[in-house]
Amino acid sequence: MSWSNVSLRLVQTAGDDPLVERLVRGEPAAVGEVYDLHHQAVRAFATRLVGDASSAEDLVHEVFVSLPKAMRNYRGESSLRTFLISIAVNHARHHVRSAVRRRSALERMHREPRNDSGDPEHDARRRELAELLSRALDELPLDQRVAFVLCEVEERTSREVAEIVGAPEGTVRTRLFHAKKKLREMLQPLHSGGSES
Amino acid sequence: MTDDLLKEATRALREEGEEPQGSDLTRARVMLSLHAAKRKRRSRLAFGVPLVAVFVAGAAAAQISGALPRAVDRVVEVFSKPATDTSPPPREARQPAQGAPLVSANPEEPDHVPPLDEVDPEAEPNELEQRADVLDDEPPPDVAPDVAARQKVEEPQRPAAPAPAGKVPGATADVPSRATEPEETGAAPAPSADPAPADPSHRRYLEAHQAHFVAHDYARALALWERYLQEFPRGRFAAEAQYNRALCLVRLGRNSEAKQALEPFANGRYGGYRQTEAQALIQAMGG
């Protein structure tokens, strides 16, 4: 099938959404508009998934740069935001690895805590827990990590997650089950150590 | 308790993701990357399209002027020549191979025609006959494959018939024709159903070729070659038609005209094209 046919079919399935049509045509301005509409959702997911702001920004950048090319596979069956999240999932592997490396380096350098809310104690506790969970997530396989972040952290339905990752709902639930089991096992000693101290 | 901790950590991670971060900077990076990619695509087109156009136009011009087949022949010749080969060039080695493809000439075949100065002067007419046989049995390299293939099909086992008496002075019947060894060429048989060529010059060439190499009616072939050259003096096969016309003159015993027709080839007016063969034929005719 030729590219023109693919594009035509995409435009037809995408309905009368002019933004989608412009994306299919590869207009940079359309990508800018999509960025303005959806960057927060994509960034939030990227940050939660990789656990590192800098790597998350790189992932966000990659998602939107690859969007015109990825639009060839857009069937119009899901929302554009869901489609963007699925692109992020597909590009996450490399960024998760770089985030793990960065986190290790920061740990060695004893990063200074940030104080950016009215309650420094609460912020510190929250950041500590988030980092704890991010480190535990580093130990999981990527598909389990994605399932946990999407289902538990982002509170998406298993159907939606199945759509994003392109796997059956049952598989998503199994991945989530194993992810939670492993995370509990990893957090148990930390919790015991924390209550002893 | 671990469940509570997991839930608390999950909530913490959720809140982490909600913090606004450097969106403007990333947006600028995204737009910069997209514009750079677009510029790259445009510059690739700006350079690539003219290059392709020049190449296509050059190839078309060469095709029209008839230089393309010769150039392709040269290239094939250069690449098919072994680096350490001290034997005669592939064109000579291919001479007796009827319908053999240019790149499939077997260097081990005993098909090399010895130079005429190594031959007994008394046997000269024989040699001339052999030369004529050898050279006119070879399908011209400029001919499209279907022409050569058709000839191959139409005379797969041509008997070792002697050249018609009187056509070449001193011709003898016991000179074996190289066309009696078609299997040695290893050429694959061509399909029997070959549609007539649409190109009029190609059709004219085919008619002359049939008269010359299939019917062996040299007088008619001479007329047809001359008609081809008259109608298509700058045709794709003009050089080969000139050479074949000379061969017909040799066959008809019109030696002075034949020499005159072969001289441009022998003098290298067509580069190395048929030069060796033309020189050998002129020498054999006593030139």
Image: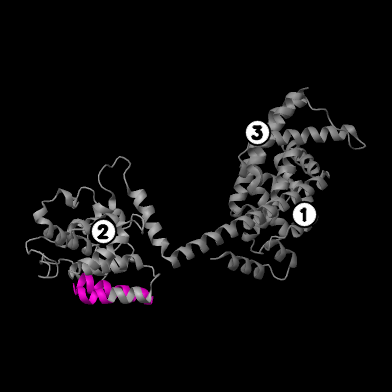
Of tags 1 and 2, which is closer to the observer? Answer: 2
Mark 2, Cα crowd under 10 Å, few <14 / some 14-19 / many 20+, is: many
Q: Name the residue located 30 percent from the left edge and 40 percent from the top edge.
A: B84
**Are there few (<14), some (14-19), or many (20+) residues within 10 Å of tag 1?**
many
Looking at the rendered structure, the kind of residue marked 1 is Tyr
For label 1, the SS is helix
> Where are the magenta residues, as a range?
B196-223
Identify which residue, A147 or B223, lies in the foreground: B223
Are both tags, 1 and 2, on one chain? no
Instruction: Choose the circle earlier in sequence order: 1 or 3.
Output: 1
Q: Which of B49 and A95 is in front in this view?
A: B49
A163 in relation to B1, above or below:
below
Label 1 – label 2 distance at C-alpha: 76 Å
Quadrant of the image containing the C terminus of chain B: bottom left
Q: State the quadrant of the N terminus of chain B.
A: top right
Question: Is most of the magenta stretch helix, strand or loop?
Answer: helix
Q: Mark 2 points at which residue?
A: B278
* Residue found at x 36% / y 56%: B271
Which residue matches tag 1? A35
User: Looking at the image, do the residues carrying marks 3 and 2 touch, with CB atoms under 8 Å apart?
Assistant: no
Disc 3 secondary structure class: helix
State which chain disc 3 sits on. Answer: A
Give the amino acid type for the residue marked by disc 2 in the picture.
Answer: Ala
Above-or-below relation of B172 to B87: below
Chain at tag 2: B
Is-magenta flag for residue A128? no
Q: Nearer the viewer, mark 1 or mark 3?
A: 1
Which color scheme does this rendered protein use? one colour
Residue that mark 3 sits on: A185
Task: Give the secondary structure at mark 2.
Answer: helix
Whether B201 is among the magenta residues is: yes
Quarter location, residue B245:
bottom left
